Image (cartoon, rainbow, N blue to C red):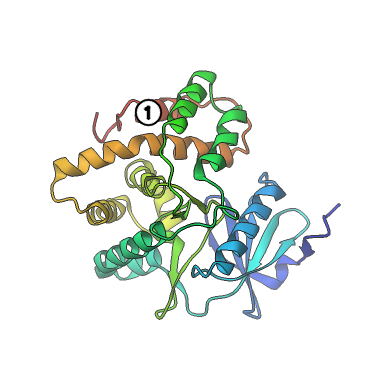
Amino acid sequence: MIESKYQQINLEDYVQSGEGGQALTYTRKDGTALAKMFLYGLGSETVEREFLISRAVYEAGIPCPEPVRLITDGEHFGAEYEVIANKRSYTRIISEEPEQLEPLTLKFVKLGKKLHSTPANTDVFPDMKDVIRPWLEKSTCLSDPLRGRLLSALDSIPSSKTCLHGDFHIGNIITNGEKDYWIDLGDFAYGVPEWDLSMNFYLANYIPSEYMDQLFHLDNATFRKHWNLLVRTYYGIRTEQEQRVYEKNLLKFTALKYAYNVCKRHNGQGEPNPRTEELALAFLDGKAPGYFE
């Protein structure tokens, strides 16, 4: 039985317009709304959390498309959002206009630093540590030894009450040429900015090329150039040696976000994966296999 909070739609009224790691997006044929439908296996609680958090972000005045309503096609759950006319993601622009890599990366850094200096309403938004902790504690897809290491690392993270995007990467900024908007806000929270920066290190160095193209319309070499400029500009880094120091400081956060994303992708179910275990433990040990040890 479909819960009354979800309004029934017919996907035949929509045209698929994008895809991501957890959802497909569809635009209504009349151009009045964008539907984000989560993939099968992701429960309604994930959809509702993203919708409510996105609504709170919108009402806080942070630029993002307005969330309109919760929807279902009878099999998948999702939400409709305001359509931003003539929008393109930063990554789509870079894929079509490679010369835009540097100016858009620098703009992304500026927007990120502005977000990371914005005080969060802690009565509305959660601490990132509180977002991650339940998944680490309950997911069967982590071994107990890794779980213990991750929870210990989580307890050592300093606190901050400034905003985090939660899924902070250059594909989650769209623009109509006049205004920029944050999208995919389900993990919006507060905490230290390293939470946001850390997964970009992972994306730059560990995503298979076909998945990189699917998610960002970019190749791995282009994303690595983006990462190098991003991390150096954000922290004011001047040398490669100094960059390695900052990257090593990110590895604890990378391990936690990597494990969290794996747990979410499998809805917390399944057996531990040796590759996940090996890579997460390496990050916790301050190592980046294939990049630096």
Q: Position of residue 223 (x, y in %)?
A: 31, 53
Nearest to the observer: residue 120 or residue 144: 120
Q: Position of residue 126 (x, y in %)?
A: 56, 48
In this rendering, is residue 116 above or below 135? Answer: below
Left or right: 52 with respect to 257? right
Q: What secondary structure is marked by label 1?
A: helix
Q: Residue furthest top?
A: 145
Q: Residue furthest right?
A: 1
Residue 3: quarter of image: bottom right
Left or right: 56 with respect to 209? right
Number of marks in picture: 1
Nearest to the observer: residue 259 or residue 62: 62
Residue 71: quarter of image: bottom right
Q: Which residue is mark 1?
A: 284
Left or right: 100 with respect to 208? left
Q: Position of residue 258 (x, y in %)?
A: 45, 38
Q: Residues within 10 Å of mark 1 (few under 14, many from 20)?
A: many
Residue 153: quarter of image: top left
In this rendering, is residue 166 above or below 246? Answer: below
Q: Amino acid at mark 1?
A: Leu
Q: Position of residue 181 (x, y in %)?
A: 47, 69
In this rendering, is residue 290 above or below 100? Answer: above
Task: Name the residue at 14% across, 51% down.
Answer: 238
Task: Name the residue at 37% across, 44% down.
Answer: 198
Task: Name the residue at 46% across, 31% down.
Answer: 155
User: Split into 4 quadrants, where in the image is the C terminus?
Assistant: top left
